[in-house]
Image (cartoon, rainbow, N blue to C red):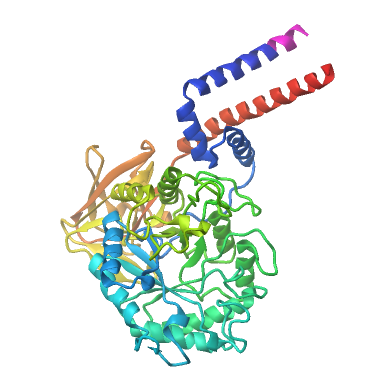
Amino acid sequence: MRLVKRRLLVALSVIGLLALAAFLTRDATHQLLADWTGEEDFQYQLRGLGYLALSLFQPSPDTANFAPMKYADVNPFGVNTFLEQEVEETKVRQTLQMIHDAGFHWIRQEFPWEDIEEPGKGQYWDVKYNHSTWDKYDLIVRLAPEYDIQIIARLDHPPAWTRHDGRARGDFAPPDNYNDYGDFVATVVNRYKGKIKYYQLWNEPNIYPEWGNQPVNAADYVRLLKIGYTRAKQADPNVVILSAGLAQTTEQGPKNVSDLTFLQQMYDAGVRGYFDILAVQDYGLFTGPGDRRLDPQRTNFSRPQLIRQIMVKNGDADKSIWAMEIGWNAVPLGMDAPYGRVTAQQQADYATQAYARAQNEWPWMGAMMYWFFKRADNHEVNQPFYYFRMLNPDFTPMPVYAAMKDYIAQARFVGIGFHSTGDWAMDWRGAWETRADSQAYFGEYKIGRLGDSVSFIFSGTDLDLVMKQNPYGGAVRVQVDNQPPREIALWRTDPEAGGRVALARNLDDGEHRVTVTVTRAPVAINGFIVQRGNAWWEWKVLVVWAFGGFALAVGAYLFWTRMNADKRG
Protein backbone atom coordinates (compact mmCIF):
# COMPACT_ATOMS: atom_id res chain seq x y z
CA MET A 1 0.00 0.00 0.00
CA ARG A 2 2.88 2.34 0.85
CA LEU A 3 4.44 1.71 -2.62
CA VAL A 4 1.13 2.46 -4.33
CA LYS A 5 0.82 5.72 -2.42
CA ARG A 6 4.39 6.67 -3.33
CA ARG A 7 3.76 6.02 -7.02
CA LEU A 8 0.53 7.97 -6.88
CA LEU A 9 2.35 10.85 -5.20
CA VAL A 10 5.04 10.81 -7.92
CA ALA A 11 2.39 10.76 -10.64
CA LEU A 12 0.50 13.66 -9.05
CA SER A 13 3.78 15.57 -8.68
CA VAL A 14 4.55 15.12 -12.38
CA ILE A 15 1.04 16.25 -13.26
CA GLY A 16 1.45 19.23 -10.98
CA LEU A 17 4.77 20.20 -12.56
CA LEU A 18 3.29 19.88 -16.04
CA ALA A 19 0.34 21.98 -14.98
CA LEU A 20 2.65 24.63 -13.47
CA ALA A 21 4.79 24.69 -16.63
CA ALA A 22 1.71 24.99 -18.80
CA PHE A 23 0.41 27.85 -16.63
CA LEU A 24 3.69 29.78 -16.66
CA THR A 25 3.92 29.52 -20.44
CA ARG A 26 0.18 29.53 -21.04
CA ASP A 27 0.19 31.88 -24.05
CA ALA A 28 2.90 29.95 -25.86
CA THR A 29 1.34 26.64 -24.81
CA HIS A 30 -2.07 27.72 -26.05
CA GLN A 31 -0.61 28.69 -29.44
CA LEU A 32 1.35 25.45 -29.70
CA LEU A 33 -1.75 23.40 -28.93
CA ALA A 34 -3.79 25.46 -31.41
CA ASP A 35 -1.14 24.88 -34.09
CA TRP A 36 -1.29 21.13 -33.51
CA THR A 37 -5.01 20.61 -33.00
CA GLY A 38 -6.72 23.48 -34.80
CA GLU A 39 -8.73 24.16 -31.62
CA GLU A 40 -8.81 27.35 -29.54
CA ASP A 41 -10.70 26.03 -26.50
CA PHE A 42 -8.42 24.22 -24.02
CA GLN A 43 -10.87 21.37 -23.48
CA TYR A 44 -10.97 20.63 -27.20
CA GLN A 45 -7.20 21.04 -27.45
CA LEU A 46 -6.80 18.25 -24.90
CA ARG A 47 -9.15 16.04 -26.91
CA GLY A 48 -7.18 16.80 -30.05
CA LEU A 49 -3.91 15.90 -28.35
CA GLY A 50 -5.37 12.62 -27.18
CA TYR A 51 -6.34 11.86 -30.77
CA LEU A 52 -2.85 12.72 -32.01
CA ALA A 53 -1.24 10.52 -29.38
CA LEU A 54 -3.44 7.58 -30.34
CA SER A 55 -2.88 8.24 -34.06
CA LEU A 56 0.83 7.50 -33.63
CA PHE A 57 -0.17 3.82 -33.46
CA GLN A 58 -2.06 4.09 -36.77
CA PRO A 59 -0.43 3.89 -40.20
CA SER A 60 -0.05 7.25 -41.90
CA PRO A 61 -1.96 7.75 -45.15
CA ASP A 62 0.08 6.85 -48.22
CA THR A 63 0.46 10.23 -49.89
CA ALA A 64 3.60 9.42 -51.94
CA ASN A 65 5.33 12.60 -50.84
CA PHE A 66 8.43 12.02 -52.94
CA ALA A 67 6.81 11.06 -56.23
CA PRO A 68 7.78 13.37 -59.11
CA MET A 69 4.70 15.50 -59.87
CA LYS A 70 4.03 18.15 -62.47
CA TYR A 71 2.33 21.40 -61.42
CA ALA A 72 3.22 20.96 -57.74
CA ASP A 73 6.19 23.36 -57.95
CA VAL A 74 4.17 26.43 -58.91
CA ASN A 75 3.72 29.67 -57.01
CA PRO A 76 1.10 28.61 -54.44
CA PHE A 77 -0.62 31.97 -53.91
CA GLY A 78 -3.96 32.68 -55.56
CA VAL A 79 -7.38 34.21 -54.94
CA ASN A 80 -10.92 33.80 -56.26
CA THR A 81 -12.31 36.80 -58.11
CA PHE A 82 -15.63 38.00 -59.52
CA LEU A 83 -14.22 40.52 -61.98
CA GLU A 84 -17.03 39.93 -64.47
CA GLN A 85 -19.36 41.67 -62.00
CA GLU A 86 -17.38 44.91 -61.97
CA VAL A 87 -18.91 47.46 -64.31
CA GLU A 88 -15.98 49.89 -64.52
CA GLU A 89 -12.56 49.05 -65.95
CA THR A 90 -10.96 51.20 -63.25
CA LYS A 91 -12.31 48.84 -60.59
CA VAL A 92 -11.07 45.79 -62.46
CA ARG A 93 -7.65 47.42 -62.63
CA GLN A 94 -7.71 48.40 -58.96
CA THR A 95 -8.61 44.84 -57.99
CA LEU A 96 -5.78 43.38 -60.07
CA GLN A 97 -3.35 45.97 -58.72
CA MET A 98 -4.16 45.09 -55.11
CA ILE A 99 -3.92 41.38 -55.89
CA HIS A 100 -0.50 41.97 -57.44
CA ASP A 101 0.64 44.22 -54.57
CA ALA A 102 -0.16 41.49 -52.05
CA GLY A 103 2.00 39.04 -54.01
CA PHE A 104 -0.71 36.74 -55.38
CA HIS A 105 0.11 35.10 -58.71
CA TRP A 106 -3.21 33.45 -59.67
CA ILE A 107 -6.84 34.39 -59.97
CA ARG A 108 -9.55 31.78 -60.29
CA GLN A 109 -12.17 33.49 -62.37
CA GLU A 110 -15.47 32.03 -63.52
CA PHE A 111 -16.41 32.31 -67.19
CA PRO A 112 -20.10 31.44 -66.75
CA TRP A 113 -21.45 29.58 -69.75
CA GLU A 114 -24.89 31.16 -69.31
CA ASP A 115 -23.39 34.64 -69.44
CA ILE A 116 -21.41 34.03 -72.63
CA GLU A 117 -23.40 31.76 -74.97
CA GLU A 118 -26.75 33.47 -74.76
CA PRO A 119 -29.57 33.57 -75.82
CA GLY A 120 -29.00 30.34 -77.78
CA LYS A 121 -26.38 27.97 -79.10
CA GLY A 122 -23.66 29.74 -81.04
CA GLN A 123 -24.95 33.18 -80.04
CA TYR A 124 -22.66 35.56 -78.17
CA TRP A 125 -24.55 38.84 -78.17
CA ASP A 126 -26.13 40.68 -75.26
CA VAL A 127 -29.38 41.87 -76.85
CA LYS A 128 -30.32 43.95 -73.79
CA TYR A 129 -27.20 46.12 -73.85
CA ASN A 130 -26.31 45.55 -77.51
CA HIS A 131 -22.72 44.36 -77.23
CA SER A 132 -20.70 41.15 -77.42
CA THR A 133 -20.96 38.88 -74.40
CA TRP A 134 -17.20 38.35 -74.69
CA ASP A 135 -16.34 42.00 -73.94
CA LYS A 136 -15.88 41.85 -70.17
CA TYR A 137 -14.01 38.53 -70.34
CA ASP A 138 -11.73 39.83 -73.10
CA LEU A 139 -10.96 42.76 -70.79
CA ILE A 140 -10.02 40.47 -67.88
CA VAL A 141 -7.81 38.35 -70.13
CA ARG A 142 -6.14 41.45 -71.57
CA LEU A 143 -5.48 43.13 -68.22
CA ALA A 144 -4.30 40.17 -66.10
CA PRO A 145 -0.82 39.87 -67.65
CA GLU A 146 -0.24 43.60 -67.12
CA TYR A 147 -0.24 42.79 -63.40
CA ASP A 148 1.76 39.55 -63.72
CA ILE A 149 -1.31 37.47 -62.90
CA GLN A 150 -2.29 34.13 -64.43
CA ILE A 151 -5.92 33.13 -64.89
CA ILE A 152 -7.51 29.82 -63.99
CA ALA A 153 -10.76 29.89 -65.95
CA ARG A 154 -13.65 28.03 -64.36
CA LEU A 155 -16.14 26.81 -66.98
CA ASP A 156 -19.60 25.83 -65.74
CA HIS A 157 -23.06 27.32 -65.04
CA PRO A 158 -24.94 26.22 -68.18
CA PRO A 159 -27.58 28.44 -69.81
CA ALA A 160 -31.23 27.42 -69.54
CA TRP A 161 -31.47 26.62 -73.25
CA THR A 162 -29.13 23.61 -72.76
CA ARG A 163 -31.82 21.76 -70.73
CA HIS A 164 -35.22 20.59 -71.92
CA ASP A 165 -36.77 21.74 -68.65
CA GLY A 166 -34.95 25.07 -68.50
CA ARG A 167 -34.35 26.09 -64.89
CA ALA A 168 -36.68 23.52 -63.35
CA ARG A 169 -33.70 21.65 -61.82
CA GLY A 170 -31.88 24.84 -60.88
CA ASP A 171 -29.34 27.07 -62.59
CA PHE A 172 -26.41 24.65 -62.29
CA ALA A 173 -27.87 21.38 -63.63
CA PRO A 174 -25.76 19.91 -66.46
CA PRO A 175 -26.87 20.19 -70.10
CA ASP A 176 -28.97 17.51 -71.75
CA ASN A 177 -26.35 17.10 -74.46
CA TYR A 178 -22.84 16.96 -73.00
CA ASN A 179 -21.43 17.76 -76.42
CA ASP A 180 -22.89 21.25 -76.06
CA TYR A 181 -20.53 21.69 -73.11
CA GLY A 182 -17.67 20.31 -75.19
CA ASP A 183 -18.44 22.89 -77.88
CA PHE A 184 -18.41 25.69 -75.31
CA VAL A 185 -15.10 24.54 -73.83
CA ALA A 186 -13.52 24.34 -77.28
CA THR A 187 -14.83 27.81 -78.16
CA VAL A 188 -13.35 29.40 -75.01
CA VAL A 189 -10.00 27.62 -75.36
CA ASN A 190 -9.73 28.59 -79.03
CA ARG A 191 -10.53 32.21 -78.28
CA TYR A 192 -7.92 32.51 -75.53
CA LYS A 193 -5.26 30.22 -76.98
CA GLY A 194 -1.86 31.39 -75.77
CA LYS A 195 -3.51 33.68 -73.18
CA ILE A 196 -5.11 31.26 -70.73
CA LYS A 197 -3.35 27.99 -69.98
CA TYR A 198 -5.31 26.64 -66.99
CA TYR A 199 -8.98 25.63 -67.10
CA GLN A 200 -11.20 24.07 -64.46
CA LEU A 201 -14.07 22.02 -65.83
CA TRP A 202 -17.10 22.39 -63.54
CA ASN A 203 -17.34 22.97 -59.80
CA GLU A 204 -18.49 20.81 -56.87
CA PRO A 205 -20.43 18.16 -58.85
CA ASN A 206 -20.76 16.08 -55.66
CA ILE A 207 -23.26 18.41 -53.98
CA TYR A 208 -26.54 20.24 -54.47
CA PRO A 209 -27.04 22.69 -56.16
CA GLU A 210 -23.86 22.50 -58.28
CA TRP A 211 -25.20 19.43 -60.10
CA GLY A 212 -28.76 20.78 -60.07
CA ASN A 213 -31.76 19.84 -57.98
CA GLN A 214 -31.24 16.12 -58.55
CA PRO A 215 -29.10 13.26 -57.22
CA VAL A 216 -25.40 13.71 -57.95
CA ASN A 217 -23.72 11.14 -60.18
CA ALA A 218 -19.96 10.65 -60.43
CA ALA A 219 -20.16 8.61 -63.65
CA ASP A 220 -22.15 11.38 -65.34
CA TYR A 221 -19.63 14.01 -64.26
CA VAL A 222 -16.76 11.85 -65.56
CA ARG A 223 -18.55 11.57 -68.92
CA LEU A 224 -18.87 15.37 -69.03
CA LEU A 225 -15.23 15.84 -67.96
CA LYS A 226 -13.96 13.44 -70.63
CA ILE A 227 -15.75 15.40 -73.34
CA GLY A 228 -14.52 18.74 -72.01
CA TYR A 229 -10.95 17.50 -71.55
CA THR A 230 -10.79 16.01 -75.04
CA ARG A 231 -12.21 19.10 -76.74
CA ALA A 232 -9.91 21.43 -74.79
CA LYS A 233 -6.79 19.45 -75.72
CA GLN A 234 -7.87 19.34 -79.36
CA ALA A 235 -8.22 23.12 -79.36
CA ASP A 236 -4.88 23.70 -77.59
CA PRO A 237 -2.65 20.76 -76.61
CA ASN A 238 -0.77 23.01 -74.18
CA VAL A 239 -3.69 23.75 -71.86
CA VAL A 240 -3.73 22.28 -68.36
CA ILE A 241 -7.05 20.84 -67.21
CA LEU A 242 -8.19 20.80 -63.60
CA SER A 243 -11.02 18.59 -62.49
CA ALA A 244 -13.94 20.12 -60.61
CA GLY A 245 -13.16 21.05 -57.02
CA LEU A 246 -14.93 18.51 -54.83
CA ALA A 247 -16.88 19.95 -51.91
CA GLN A 248 -16.06 18.73 -48.40
CA THR A 249 -18.97 16.73 -47.04
CA THR A 250 -19.52 13.51 -45.11
CA GLU A 251 -23.00 12.79 -46.50
CA GLN A 252 -23.59 9.72 -48.65
CA GLY A 253 -26.38 10.89 -50.94
CA PRO A 254 -28.43 11.29 -52.84
CA LYS A 255 -28.04 15.07 -53.21
CA ASN A 256 -24.68 15.35 -51.44
CA VAL A 257 -22.02 12.65 -51.59
CA SER A 258 -18.75 12.60 -49.64
CA ASP A 259 -15.85 13.94 -51.66
CA LEU A 260 -13.91 10.79 -50.74
CA THR A 261 -16.66 8.47 -51.96
CA PHE A 262 -17.30 10.58 -55.06
CA LEU A 263 -13.62 10.59 -56.05
CA GLN A 264 -13.39 6.82 -55.84
CA GLN A 265 -16.56 6.60 -57.93
CA MET A 266 -14.88 8.89 -60.46
CA TYR A 267 -11.93 6.51 -60.69
CA ASP A 268 -14.30 3.56 -61.00
CA ALA A 269 -15.94 5.38 -63.92
CA GLY A 270 -12.60 5.77 -65.74
CA VAL A 271 -11.53 9.34 -64.90
CA ARG A 272 -7.83 8.52 -64.84
CA GLY A 273 -6.09 10.24 -67.75
CA TYR A 274 -8.77 12.94 -68.13
CA PHE A 275 -7.37 15.64 -65.85
CA ASP A 276 -3.89 17.09 -65.33
CA ILE A 277 -4.49 18.41 -61.80
CA LEU A 278 -7.00 17.18 -59.23
CA ALA A 279 -8.92 20.07 -57.66
CA VAL A 280 -10.35 20.13 -54.13
CA GLN A 281 -12.00 22.62 -51.79
CA ASP A 282 -10.16 22.96 -48.48
CA TYR A 283 -12.08 25.06 -46.00
CA GLY A 284 -11.10 24.92 -42.34
CA LEU A 285 -14.75 25.31 -41.28
CA PHE A 286 -14.97 24.74 -37.50
CA THR A 287 -11.28 24.27 -36.67
CA GLY A 288 -8.00 25.93 -37.60
CA PRO A 289 -5.34 24.79 -40.08
CA GLY A 290 -3.49 22.92 -37.34
CA ASP A 291 -6.27 20.34 -37.02
CA ARG A 292 -4.39 17.16 -38.01
CA ARG A 293 -7.18 14.72 -37.28
CA LEU A 294 -7.76 12.42 -40.26
CA ASP A 295 -11.21 10.93 -40.30
CA PRO A 296 -13.60 10.42 -43.24
CA GLN A 297 -16.34 11.71 -40.94
CA ARG A 298 -14.50 14.97 -40.20
CA THR A 299 -14.35 17.95 -42.58
CA ASN A 300 -11.25 19.99 -41.76
CA PHE A 301 -8.16 21.47 -43.38
CA SER A 302 -6.35 18.10 -43.31
CA ARG A 303 -8.93 16.41 -45.54
CA PRO A 304 -6.83 16.66 -48.76
CA GLN A 305 -4.50 14.05 -47.25
CA LEU A 306 -7.35 11.52 -47.52
CA ILE A 307 -8.04 12.68 -51.08
CA ARG A 308 -4.36 12.24 -51.91
CA GLN A 309 -4.42 8.71 -50.49
CA ILE A 310 -7.23 7.78 -52.90
CA MET A 311 -5.26 9.23 -55.82
CA VAL A 312 -2.18 7.18 -54.91
CA LYS A 313 -4.25 4.02 -54.53
CA ASN A 314 -5.64 4.56 -58.03
CA GLY A 315 -2.29 5.12 -59.73
CA ASP A 316 -2.22 8.93 -59.81
CA ALA A 317 0.70 9.55 -57.45
CA ASP A 318 2.34 11.60 -60.21
CA LYS A 319 -0.48 14.16 -60.26
CA SER A 320 -0.72 17.13 -57.92
CA ILE A 321 -3.67 18.62 -56.05
CA TRP A 322 -4.69 22.27 -56.18
CA ALA A 323 -7.04 23.75 -53.59
CA MET A 324 -9.49 25.96 -55.44
CA GLU A 325 -11.16 27.44 -52.36
CA ILE A 326 -9.68 27.85 -48.88
CA GLY A 327 -10.53 30.21 -46.05
CA TRP A 328 -12.32 30.81 -42.75
CA ASN A 329 -15.57 32.67 -42.23
CA ALA A 330 -15.55 35.82 -40.05
CA VAL A 331 -19.33 36.05 -39.85
CA PRO A 332 -20.51 38.50 -37.15
CA LEU A 333 -22.11 37.31 -33.92
CA GLY A 334 -25.86 37.09 -34.19
CA MET A 335 -25.83 35.63 -37.70
CA ASP A 336 -26.03 31.96 -38.60
CA ALA A 337 -22.62 30.33 -38.96
CA PRO A 338 -23.00 27.32 -41.29
CA TYR A 339 -19.31 27.60 -42.26
CA GLY A 340 -18.00 28.08 -38.72
CA ARG A 341 -17.15 31.42 -37.11
CA VAL A 342 -13.79 33.09 -36.43
CA THR A 343 -12.76 36.62 -35.60
CA ALA A 344 -11.27 38.82 -38.32
CA GLN A 345 -7.84 38.39 -36.70
CA GLN A 346 -8.21 34.61 -36.52
CA GLN A 347 -9.22 34.64 -40.18
CA ALA A 348 -5.94 36.41 -40.96
CA ASP A 349 -3.84 34.14 -38.75
CA TYR A 350 -5.43 30.95 -40.06
CA ALA A 351 -4.93 31.94 -43.70
CA THR A 352 -1.17 32.42 -43.32
CA GLN A 353 -0.85 29.28 -41.18
CA ALA A 354 -2.73 27.28 -43.82
CA TYR A 355 -0.38 28.30 -46.61
CA ALA A 356 2.63 27.71 -44.37
CA ARG A 357 1.46 24.23 -43.43
CA ALA A 358 0.82 23.22 -47.03
CA GLN A 359 4.21 24.57 -48.15
CA ASN A 360 6.04 22.77 -45.34
CA GLU A 361 4.14 19.47 -45.17
CA TRP A 362 2.29 18.75 -48.45
CA PRO A 363 4.65 18.48 -51.45
CA TRP A 364 1.74 17.26 -53.59
CA MET A 365 -0.21 20.49 -53.08
CA GLY A 366 0.29 23.13 -55.76
CA ALA A 367 -1.62 26.43 -55.92
CA MET A 368 -4.19 27.35 -53.26
CA MET A 369 -6.91 29.91 -54.01
CA TYR A 370 -8.14 32.03 -51.11
CA TRP A 371 -11.94 32.34 -51.08
CA PHE A 372 -12.46 35.16 -51.94
CA PHE A 373 -10.94 38.55 -52.78
CA LYS A 374 -13.99 40.86 -52.97
CA ARG A 375 -17.52 41.22 -54.26
CA ALA A 376 -18.57 44.07 -56.54
CA ASP A 377 -21.20 45.34 -54.06
CA ASN A 378 -22.60 44.57 -50.62
CA HIS A 379 -26.04 43.22 -51.51
CA GLU A 380 -25.04 39.89 -49.89
CA VAL A 381 -24.03 41.47 -46.58
CA ASN A 382 -26.79 39.55 -44.79
CA GLN A 383 -25.48 36.19 -46.00
CA PRO A 384 -22.76 34.28 -44.09
CA PHE A 385 -20.99 33.60 -47.40
CA TYR A 386 -20.12 37.30 -47.69
CA TYR A 387 -17.76 37.17 -44.71
CA PHE A 388 -15.08 35.10 -46.35
CA ARG A 389 -14.02 38.27 -48.20
CA MET A 390 -10.51 39.68 -48.13
CA LEU A 391 -11.62 43.17 -49.15
CA ASN A 392 -14.91 44.99 -48.79
CA PRO A 393 -16.62 46.16 -51.99
CA ASP A 394 -15.19 49.67 -51.43
CA PHE A 395 -11.66 48.16 -51.45
CA THR A 396 -11.22 48.51 -47.69
CA PRO A 397 -9.03 45.53 -46.72
CA MET A 398 -9.74 43.09 -43.93
CA PRO A 399 -6.83 42.05 -41.67
CA VAL A 400 -6.33 38.91 -43.77
CA TYR A 401 -5.14 41.02 -46.71
CA ALA A 402 -2.23 42.58 -44.81
CA ALA A 403 -1.40 39.25 -43.15
CA MET A 404 -1.16 37.45 -46.48
CA LYS A 405 0.84 40.30 -48.01
CA ASP A 406 3.39 40.07 -45.19
CA TYR A 407 3.54 36.28 -45.37
CA ILE A 408 3.92 36.02 -49.14
CA ALA A 409 6.83 38.48 -49.07
CA GLN A 410 8.95 35.99 -47.09
CA ALA A 411 7.50 32.64 -48.20
CA ARG A 412 9.59 31.84 -51.28
CA PHE A 413 11.21 28.55 -50.32
CA VAL A 414 11.37 24.90 -51.35
CA GLY A 415 9.63 22.52 -48.93
CA ILE A 416 9.93 18.77 -48.52
CA GLY A 417 9.47 16.59 -51.59
CA PHE A 418 10.98 15.92 -55.00
CA HIS A 419 11.19 19.21 -56.89
CA SER A 420 11.65 19.83 -60.58
CA THR A 421 14.10 22.33 -62.06
CA GLY A 422 11.07 24.51 -62.80
CA ASP A 423 10.26 25.12 -59.13
CA TRP A 424 9.09 28.72 -58.68
CA ALA A 425 11.42 29.28 -55.69
CA MET A 426 14.66 28.46 -57.54
CA ASP A 427 16.92 31.09 -59.14
CA TRP A 428 18.85 29.81 -62.17
CA ARG A 429 21.70 32.05 -63.32
CA GLY A 430 23.72 31.67 -66.48
CA ALA A 431 22.96 29.86 -69.73
CA TRP A 432 21.09 26.82 -68.42
CA GLU A 433 19.31 24.93 -71.20
CA THR A 434 16.05 23.07 -70.58
CA ARG A 435 15.73 19.82 -72.54
CA ALA A 436 12.61 17.73 -72.95
CA ASP A 437 13.10 14.02 -72.31
CA SER A 438 10.31 11.52 -71.72
CA GLN A 439 12.72 9.34 -69.73
CA ALA A 440 13.61 12.10 -67.31
CA TYR A 441 11.73 12.83 -64.12
CA PHE A 442 9.11 15.53 -64.84
CA GLY A 443 9.76 15.02 -68.57
CA GLU A 444 12.65 17.49 -68.69
CA TYR A 445 16.01 18.45 -67.18
CA LYS A 446 18.52 21.31 -67.31
CA ILE A 447 22.03 21.31 -68.81
CA GLY A 448 24.51 23.69 -67.17
CA ARG A 449 27.77 25.13 -68.52
CA LEU A 450 30.86 26.34 -66.67
CA GLY A 451 29.92 29.05 -64.17
CA ASP A 452 26.16 28.48 -64.32
CA SER A 453 24.52 28.34 -60.89
CA VAL A 454 21.25 27.72 -59.10
CA SER A 455 20.37 28.94 -55.63
CA PHE A 456 17.33 28.72 -53.39
CA ILE A 457 16.11 28.53 -49.80
CA PHE A 458 14.88 25.12 -48.64
CA SER A 459 13.08 24.11 -45.46
CA GLY A 460 14.18 20.79 -43.99
CA THR A 461 17.21 18.92 -42.70
CA ASP A 462 18.49 17.02 -45.78
CA LEU A 463 19.03 17.99 -49.42
CA ASP A 464 19.87 15.84 -52.44
CA LEU A 465 20.71 16.78 -56.01
CA VAL A 466 19.13 14.48 -58.61
CA MET A 467 21.22 14.11 -61.75
CA LYS A 468 19.99 13.11 -65.16
CA GLN A 469 21.24 9.56 -65.37
CA ASN A 470 23.28 8.44 -68.33
CA PRO A 471 25.48 10.17 -68.91
CA TYR A 472 26.88 11.43 -65.61
CA GLY A 473 29.59 14.00 -65.70
CA GLY A 474 30.81 17.35 -64.61
CA ALA A 475 31.44 18.76 -61.17
CA VAL A 476 29.78 21.34 -58.91
CA ARG A 477 30.67 23.53 -55.96
CA VAL A 478 28.04 23.43 -53.21
CA GLN A 479 27.58 26.18 -50.61
CA VAL A 480 25.03 25.59 -47.81
CA ASP A 481 24.44 28.55 -45.49
CA ASN A 482 27.81 29.74 -44.17
CA GLN A 483 29.46 26.32 -44.30
CA PRO A 484 32.70 25.93 -46.27
CA PRO A 485 31.94 25.17 -49.95
CA ARG A 486 32.42 21.60 -51.14
CA GLU A 487 33.52 20.36 -54.55
CA ILE A 488 31.59 17.31 -55.79
CA ALA A 489 32.63 15.26 -58.82
CA LEU A 490 29.37 13.97 -60.23
CA TRP A 491 30.83 11.01 -62.08
CA ARG A 492 31.06 9.33 -58.68
CA THR A 493 27.27 9.15 -58.43
CA ASP A 494 26.05 5.64 -57.72
CA PRO A 495 23.62 4.55 -60.48
CA GLU A 496 21.78 2.42 -57.92
CA ALA A 497 20.92 5.58 -55.98
CA GLY A 498 18.80 6.92 -58.85
CA GLY A 499 21.24 9.67 -59.69
CA ARG A 500 21.03 11.21 -56.20
CA VAL A 501 23.91 13.20 -54.74
CA ALA A 502 23.83 14.21 -51.07
CA LEU A 503 24.34 17.95 -50.66
CA ALA A 504 23.35 18.37 -46.99
CA ARG A 505 22.56 16.07 -44.08
CA ASN A 506 21.29 16.48 -40.50
CA LEU A 507 20.91 20.25 -40.57
CA ASP A 508 18.76 21.99 -37.99
CA ASP A 509 15.16 21.80 -39.12
CA GLY A 510 14.36 25.14 -40.70
CA GLU A 511 15.29 27.30 -43.64
CA HIS A 512 18.70 27.05 -45.32
CA ARG A 513 20.18 28.65 -48.43
CA VAL A 514 22.05 26.55 -50.98
CA THR A 515 23.98 27.55 -54.09
CA VAL A 516 25.16 24.99 -56.64
CA THR A 517 27.72 26.23 -59.21
CA VAL A 518 29.01 24.28 -62.22
CA THR A 519 32.81 23.95 -62.02
CA ARG A 520 33.23 21.30 -64.73
CA ALA A 521 30.73 21.09 -67.56
CA PRO A 522 28.38 19.81 -68.67
CA VAL A 523 26.12 19.12 -65.70
CA ALA A 524 22.63 17.62 -66.17
CA ILE A 525 20.25 18.36 -63.28
CA ASN A 526 16.86 16.65 -63.00
CA GLY A 527 15.72 18.08 -59.67
CA PHE A 528 16.25 18.30 -55.92
CA ILE A 529 14.89 16.29 -52.97
CA VAL A 530 14.28 17.95 -49.60
CA GLN A 531 13.63 15.79 -46.53
CA ARG A 532 13.31 16.01 -42.78
CA GLY A 533 15.35 13.63 -40.68
CA ASN A 534 14.08 11.41 -37.87
CA ALA A 535 15.13 13.81 -35.11
CA TRP A 536 12.39 16.24 -36.11
CA TRP A 537 9.75 13.49 -35.98
CA GLU A 538 11.04 12.03 -32.72
CA TRP A 539 10.91 15.46 -31.04
CA LYS A 540 7.31 15.98 -32.16
CA VAL A 541 6.28 12.51 -30.95
CA LEU A 542 7.84 13.23 -27.55
CA VAL A 543 5.99 16.52 -27.16
CA VAL A 544 2.67 15.03 -28.33
CA TRP A 545 3.02 12.19 -25.87
CA ALA A 546 3.96 14.57 -23.05
CA PHE A 547 0.93 16.79 -23.61
CA GLY A 548 -1.25 13.82 -24.52
CA GLY A 549 -0.27 12.03 -21.32
CA PHE A 550 -0.99 15.18 -19.39
CA ALA A 551 -4.42 15.43 -21.05
CA LEU A 552 -5.22 11.80 -20.26
CA ALA A 553 -4.00 12.19 -16.69
CA VAL A 554 -6.12 15.30 -16.14
CA GLY A 555 -9.10 13.50 -17.62
CA ALA A 556 -8.55 10.47 -15.38
CA TYR A 557 -8.14 12.68 -12.31
CA LEU A 558 -11.35 14.60 -13.04
CA PHE A 559 -13.20 11.33 -13.60
CA TRP A 560 -11.85 9.88 -10.32
CA THR A 561 -12.79 12.96 -8.29
CA ARG A 562 -16.28 12.98 -9.79
CA MET A 563 -16.75 9.29 -8.97
CA ASN A 564 -15.67 9.89 -5.37
CA ALA A 565 -17.98 12.88 -5.09
CA ASP A 566 -20.87 10.76 -6.34
CA LYS A 567 -20.07 8.08 -3.76
CA ARG A 568 -20.01 10.64 -0.96
CA GLY A 569 -23.29 12.03 -2.19
Dominant secondary structure (helix, strand or loop) of the stretch shown in magenta: helix
Residue sitting at x 35%, y 83%:
134
Instruction: Look at the image and tell me whether residue 236 can be seen.
Output: no
State how many labels appear: 0
Q: Nearer the viewer, residue 418 or 505?
A: 418
Direction from residue 376 to residue 380 in the image, left or right? right
Direction from residue 352 to residue 541 in the image, left or right? right
Residue 172, percent from left and from top = 55, 76
Residue sitting at x 39%, y 68%:
82
Q: Quadrant of the N terminus?
A: top right
Q: Nearer the viewer, residue 175 or 268?
A: 175
Instruction: Look at the image and tell me whether residue 157 can be seen.
Output: yes
Q: Quadrant of the C terminus?
A: top right
Residue 122, percent from left and from top = 44, 93
Q: Is residue 547 above or below residue 162?
A: above
Residue sitting at x 31%, y 74%:
140
Residue extending farthest to the top is 2
Residue 108, percent from left and from top = 40, 67
Residue 391, percent from left and from top = 37, 56
Residue sitting at x 41%, y 65%:
70
Q: Is residue 496 magenta?
A: no
The segment highlighted magenta reads: 1-7
Q: Is residue 3 magenta?
A: yes
